[in-house]
Image (cartoon, helix red, strand yellow):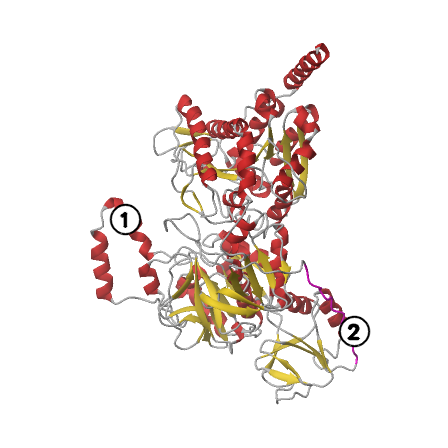
Amino acid sequence: MKKIISFFLFSIIVLSIQAQQVQSPSEFLGYEIGTQFTRHADVLSYFNYVAEKSSMVTFSTYGKTNERRPLTYAVVSSVKNMQNIETIRTNNLKQIGITEGDANPEIAIVWLSYNVHGNEASSTEASMQTLYELITQKQAWLENTVVIIDPCLNPDGRDRYANWYNQVKATPYNSAQVAAEHNEPWPGGRPNHYLFDLNRDWAWASQVETQQRLKIYNQWMPHVHVDFHEQGINEPYYFAPAAEPFHEVITDWQRDFQTEIGKNHARYFDEKGWLFFTRERFDLLYPSYGDTYPTYVGAIGMTYEQAGHGSAGLGVDTDEGYELTLVDRVAHHTTTGLSTVEISSKNAKKLNSEFKKFFQTNLKYKSYILQGEDDKINALAALLDRHEIKYGFSNSGKATGYHYGTNKTGSTDMKNALVVSTNQPKGKMIQALFEPETKLSTPLTYDITAWNLPHAFGLETIASTTLVTSTPSKTVTKTNTIPNPNAAGYISKWNSMQDATFLAALLQEDIKVRFTEKPFAVSGQSFDRGSLVITKSDNRKNPKFNETVTKIANEHNRNLFVATTSFSDNGTDFGSPDIKMIHAPRIAVLRGKFTSSLNYGAIWHFFEQQLHYPITSVDTDYFKNIELTRFDVLVMPSGYYKGYLDESTLKKLQEWVSNGGTLIAIDDAVSAFVDKDGFGLKNNSEEEDEKEDKKDKNLLVPYNQRENESVKNYITGSIFKTKVDVSHPMAFGYADTYFTLKAGNSSYSFIENGYNVAYIEGDAERVSGFAGEEALKGLKNSLVFGEQKIGRGSAIYLVDDVLFRSFWENGKLFFVNSLFFVNNKVVVF
């Protein structure tokens, strides 16, 4: 007994000595935390230093950003727990069925995520202080708790903001809101390298930061997850509990424990005299946030929002008459982080038991059965793999249930169908991602209200209340086309992004490619519109033509049809005017002030990381001075151009289009061409008497009802059914129905002297998500995608953003078709 007591006392002394030896962040960095913005590299230096000094901390790298900055995480707990950390981790996975075996752990796992938005920079400073206080002052909480700290989810964005701020700030800092240091230039530090909002990417995993983080997250599956943010300078501090709507998969325990956490925070804030608010603005619905995604896999997922953001700097004068300092912001985030660990430690046993219960699922829909092109099935399967969601394939039979295409009971053939069933640990996440329609307790939400993956990937889907059996995988056949020097050419299908990347690769290698505007057949094999035709005749000057084409096809797993003759079965021969040459377009993309940084970033990412085709980004600062004849295509991201496109610039654009250019306007950019001569675009407007009547009624709505009354005019990210003109080149690869994601209520009339390629005819058919009654009326007989011919060129209008957050996979081919098939000409002056 004496030996045990002596060992215990010795351990306490060792820990105390270690704690005394660890420098605080201020001591290590040489300045008080909150008096400067710390460079990301220096943050990592501090975490590495602590991990070397303390046996209570490990610090690891889980990946790199696009700009090669490390992505890291620390694991913090008692010495005893750290010695058994792998057992603690695997026991947690065992209790929820992810790893085989039985376990009933009582160690709480808390994950603290900092600085997902780069210019919300106080939280990374707080991460260092939180780490220090945990191991020097709060060791008792760590006896039954493991804390995981990701000090910066978005290093590229943080350094973009911190470096800019350090360059422009006054010394001493200037707290006036009008000072340069409180007004970030475009695009700001919020997004990552590709200007994506990483706090909307958890479910879609389009970005390298998310993809690498998910691997570690799935290895731990924490019980509590906090996403640290900042908001406007005049809002004090927000913490849990969250606002309505809550998704229906969220349990009573998850709701109730958020309240307990909030009350614990409130105790500290009240002691300090700090203001806060709860249960407003920040809901738990959209599944791709840093609070909802963890919630849908069992955690208590929360957002904490500190006043500040990119306009706060080291100190800023608020509208309420006080100065908000970075020192204050760091203190608040440090307090809630520590308070979260404290309340979790006090409830460690309950956290584990309720976490285990969450994964015992019995949901309405037992299986989702998806049919479609292999490329689309494989793309969805790749996303499921990132989330470690299990799936299988069916060999035969019919599935009956809710049919996504008709919004009623229907059936589908199950041969080679992808089957995703909810009788697995992540069944509730599957429901959130696949369900036909998400239930809303209120339409007043912080984000979109529809996102289901069957429509996003363009797959025929049945939601079945019966569990469908499937095998774990199907055989994937790798193509191996052999060069045939006697071939008249090669033909490849066209209906997926994988086909698009194949075309881009061919053009990059100077292979001449055609596409067909008519269905045709060769040697008994039928080919639909858009099929790629690669002829020996067009490439006769290329001595390695056959080898190059087949090599690229095999690399992209494209199954080429080897045509031994260019003489077709139905009259559309290889030399037909309806089999048109694709001229590799020279593409410019507008960026900078007046453009949406998010939409520009999505376009940039699309070309570089998905299509792999070169573009030239042109800034709005000098766009008006460039020679547009250098380009065949100009892409205008969503933006606010009315103050930018003056009469002379519009005239310049119109002249360039008339001479063969292709102008592609996306989302809000479309509005810049309404009622402009030659562009053929008009708003879908109401009669004047109807407008006046609505205006008069709105004037009489009481102050406290205005927000709720206004929702009748909103569309908050909803899915609509549209008709498609499949004969138009922009629609090649599509069926006559397309499900579009509308993020707003913009509505344009049908183009009178052009082509309405995708459109809503008659009353709008909402499939999923919220749309107010007045907004629905406004969509009657409206354009979705269209082409206006202008001289030799075209203006293409993509009213709905097909690249939105890079997850609406089924819309991307409309954009690719607009680049390569529509008005495929070289600009000539």
Query: Residue 188 at x, y = what percent?
Result: 50, 45
Disc 1: which residue: 706
The answer to whether 518 appears left or right of 696 in the picture is right
Q: Residue at x 22, y 50 (%)?
A: 701
- Residue 307 visible to an observer of this rendering: no
Residue denoted by label 2: 482
- Secondary structure mostly seen in the magenta stretch: loop
Return the residue nearer the eye: 129 or 340: 340
Front residue of this view, candidates 265 and 597:
265
Q: Please, which residue is most extreme toward the top here?
A: 2
Question: Left of 701 or right of it: where is 256?
Answer: right
> Disc 1 marks which amino acid?
Arg
Three-letter amino acid code at disc 2?
A: Ile
Q: What is the span of residues highlighted in magenta in the rendered image?
A: 473-485
Dot 2: what SS?
Answer: loop
Residue visible at 34% across and 30% down? Answer: 321
Q: Locate the N terminus and report the quarter of the image it occupies.
A: top right
Q: Secondary structure at mark 1?
A: helix
Between disc 1 and disc 2, whose residue precedes? 2
